[in-house]
Image (spheres, coloured by chain):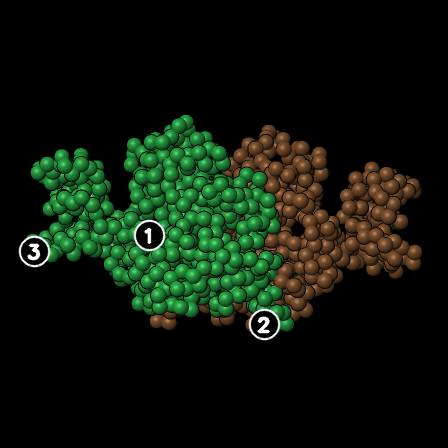
Chain colours: A brown, B green
Amino acid sequence: MRPDLSAIPALDVNLATRAAVGDALTRTARMFGDRTAIVDAGRDLSYRELDEVSSALARALLGTGVARQQPVAMLMANSWQFVATYFACAKSALVALPVNIALAPDDIAWILRDAGATVVVADAAALPLLTDFLADAPEVTLVVVGAHGADASGGRTVVSWDDFTAEHAGGPVEVIVEDRDTVQCLYTSGTTSRPKGVLVSHVSVLIGGMTNALQIGHSWGADPSTLVNVLPLFHTTALNTLVLPVLFTGGTVVLFARFDPAAMLTAIEDHSATHLMLLPIMYRALLAARGAGLPSVRRAVYAMAPMPEDVLKLVDELFPNAAVILGSGQTEVVPATVLQWPEHQHTKANSWGPAVPTVETGIMDGSGALLPRGESGEIVYRGPHVASGYWNNPEANRVSFAHGWFHSGDIGHLDDEQVLWFTDRLKDIIKSGGENVSSVDVERVVTAAPGVAECSIVGVPDDRWGEAVCAVVVPADPDSAGDDFPARVIAHAKAHLAGFQVPKRVVVVTELPKTATGKTRKHALRAQLTE
Amino acid sequence: MRPDLSAIPALDVNLATRAAVGDALTRTARMFGDRTAIVDAGRDLSYRELDEVSSALARALLGTGVARQQPVAMLMANSWQFVATYFACAKSALVALPVNIALAPDDIAWILRDAGATVVVADAAALPLLTDFLADAPEVTLVVVGAHGADASGGRTVVSWDDFTAEHAGGPVEVIVEDRDTVQCLYTSGTTSRPKGVLVSHVSVLIGGMTNALQIGHSWGADPSTLVNVLPLFHTTALNTLVLPVLFTGGTVVLFARFDPAAMLTAIEDHSATHLMLLPIMYRALLAARGAGLPSVRRAVYAMAPMPEDVLKLVDELFPNAAVILGSGQTEVVPATVLQWPEHQHTKANSWGPAVPTVETGIMDGSGALLPRGESGEIVYRGPHVASGYWNNPEANRVSFAHGWFHSGDIGHLDDEQVLWFTDRLKDIIKSGGENVSSVDVERVVTAAPGVAECSIVGVPDDRWGEAVCAVVVPADPDSAGDDFPARVIAHAKAHLAGFQVPKRVVVVTELPKTATGKTRKHALRAQLTE
């Protein structure tokens, strides 16, 4: 049974019924026009202003002649212009392509070429990152935030944000946006290969956002949330888990472009912030700078790394009314996919928690069979949060969608309460003497050894063990570590681990090789150690 | 930018990424398998059981050879079998077609023929309603809840629910379900014309359900909601606003097939119910039967009619911890479209409240222009809650989707806080002496007049006024109303209304003509009064 709509203009049906991300902003603006949407370096932007400026930018983008569903590359730190550009793309059926500005210029050039970007919006400070790309891309439209008027930069004419968006004021942008049109493409940082562009649709961002809003405790009404956010918007965590759900429900986002503990504490207090999401290391820095407890915070979410027990206790003190919970996700499954429940925060603090209501989790063996609770295998997901697929990469898509589930590349298990426990990245599991060793488990123990600042555990080929467990360790104080430091690390490991898990070798270094997003390049470590 | 998925089976991509209503039940069942999903006449059905029985029924339905997206007619009172049948249709890409069992047999036959139903699931008690339809539909598969074995009924072989679903146990039902496939078709009760089949998609029910869950205060976690529901599931209010959001978030639904105040009060207490939605008249009956206050209830929602001030006060006493809020919607915009905020319950008790976050409301004039706040016009909606359209009715679709908004047929305005105030149905507005008179406003006053039980206000053609305001009144006690009853009604109206609103004529009757859903047939009244 389908309705006969043949006599109705397609745009009318689309506007009346679609699930589109740009409409979510328009709705909040109609509802809460005078409310503050964004606070950015002291500048307040109301919902009406954010809606209008993103519509103006959308019209300007469409005016460049860029085709529907083509990318708009964004090289931008956290700012209100970032948020406006994202919504401008959403409104005009273009694809927002935020790029990690911590990447090297050649990686950035590779991404922009892979995506086929013909429009770039960049902070003035990010222009040097674009030199490689722009050198042989004369046709690209370049809009620069922070530039003054039109300017010749490196032999190219650039247009300032202000000039670009001027004279494009007007009403709503009404173009056809299909539910499954791509709204964002974020490139994942590969540790072993070129980054992959993850294409995510409007309906995924909208359902993911509403689910996260429900789960993280945002409300639509007279009691809106206030989020203080410093995580970079070019990652899915900040964008899809934090900022969009708040804007979808009429809350306020206080943006920071860089981490400044004192300024953030002041902002939390001044704006009576209700929501935070930080890395554990950032919570530690906040605690060091803290004054009194901050009672307004209702959720203190953390991500990316386990929260040490001592930090958890201090966070509880600083935010006496907050549930402290871990959020987990990945670029391919609009996060948070998995969110700890407050009631598990002490009993299952090392778990990832249960999936959110619109995601299903499973554990799969190599043959595509789902495994019973308790058994270990690859973590797989299904549901409307799952990305549409990778850009320009049929092989990655084939692997990822096998057997009707998205394959995360993570190993873990589900317990009796359907709580997800992460073991390791599939490619980082070490097969040693017939046993599977989780590098994450060994890292947790070795990092807690006296005098250890940081460590990474990898497997290296070994005649006897197949792979030998190898610890690459950064001492807290390299000068006073002493010659017996490796032996002390191994002794600590023996006291806390099974024999097959204990590192066979300890290599002391002053720093670990990392990606721009802070992940250790284990592939590089393995290559060095194997040589 | 779209991914290249050409090498992947379409079913795999669909299963991994879709927004499908059946998957929502499967997710809650995986998560909370042992939790009680449905309590029905003392029978508890766990999430695992509900998921399994709906999958078995889905396989049985597919086994009849019914084609994808074809309807399964349901003539069922509230029961766990109703819920299972709905999800069976959702899982198998069929269309659930619940029919109002209060309708007359010829209306039911008209609906089933209009929809082209070839499969019918019916309560044994509803079989007499089907005689007309079945007489010339020998090919229809008839599954009967409450029958024992196969049986010959009116010369036709029927199969019992138990026999039909037996031997169909198994794992998940994996067929392609597209986001915009139709999941439900509810026929609206027309007061002037044949009912219209409203086609609603999976993505609408899912987004509407999650939004209602967020708004009505359901949570996904260790603190699930418990809903006690007596409203009929064949209406969108009970189905889409109440029952599905609870099941999407892992709560418990206690079902009643008929209103029994004492039994409902017991159920609220025994199950520590957190959520109720009743008609104001039902709250009045509950209050009459009440014992002590019931502290577990967090939301007492009402619908369909204004809540008299005295009842509101008593509801506050019976449910001391509940927000009492009005929910409004219509079959064409998966409700609740508009939900009062608790903070408006006293200051704006007569309003409909603001739209939920995934619906946008507007007020439109006859030319398709949106009107500013404060001005009165037709209430229009847009967003993913809006139905896909009417079945078999291109003309109704053309009218409904004009100018890119769904036209509700209701008149109202939005105030400064974007709160919606309903004036009247467009076709019930009376144009008298150059003024627009809201029949609803006049009804509110006349119903409050001493000795009046019920009334309906309609306009009848009049040489002087164009239309004259006419009150059709049911006295509380017809025997003692007296000859001056009409004059007293008019005197009361004059004391509370503007001159042009005061009824020119009062007609006393013993009952009002009504539709099966309890709406007054104003069209019939106007016809009678015009003769």
Tell me if mark 2 has few (under 14), some (14-19) or many (20+) residues whose alpha carbon lies within 10 angstroms of its own: few
Which label sits in the foreground, 1 or 2?
1
In percent of width and height, residue A142 lies at: 55, 65
Q: Nearer the viewer, residue B78 or A383?
A: B78
**Of the residues shown, which amino acid type is indicated by label 1?**
Ala
Mark 2 and mark 3 in contact (Cβ < 8 Å)?
Answer: no
Is label 1 on the same chain as label 3?
A: yes
Residue that label 2 marks: A138
Tell me if mark 3 has few (under 14), some (14-19) or many (20+) residues whose alpha carbon lies within 10 angstroms of its own: few
Q: Nearer the viewer, residue A32 or B388?
A: B388
SS for callout 2:
loop
Whether residue A307 is situated above or below residue B520 in the rendered picture: above
Q: Nearer the viewer, residue B491 or B508?
A: B508
**Of the residues shown, which amino acid type is indicated by label 2?**
Pro
Would you identify the image quadrant in which residue A351 lies?
top right
Quick one: label 1 or label 3, which is nearer the N terminus? 1
Is label 3 on the same chain as label 2?
A: no
In percent of width and height, residue A365 lies at: 72, 58
Would you identify the image quadrant in which residue B184 lies?
bottom left
SS for callout 1:
loop
Is label 1 on the same chain as label 2?
A: no
Q: Residue at x 23, y 56 (%)?
A: B427
Q: Nearer the viewer, residue B158 or A377?
A: B158
Residue that label 3 marks: B463
Q: Tell which subunit mark 1 falls on.
A: B
Mark 3 and mark 1 in contact (Cβ < 8 Å)?
Answer: no
In percent of width and height, residue A448 lies at: 79, 39
Q: Is residue A459 visible?
A: no
Residue that label 1 marks: B102
- The CA distance from mark 1 to mark 2 is 71 Å
In percent of width and height, residue B450 lies at: 18, 34
Q: Tell which subunit mark 2 falls on.
A: A
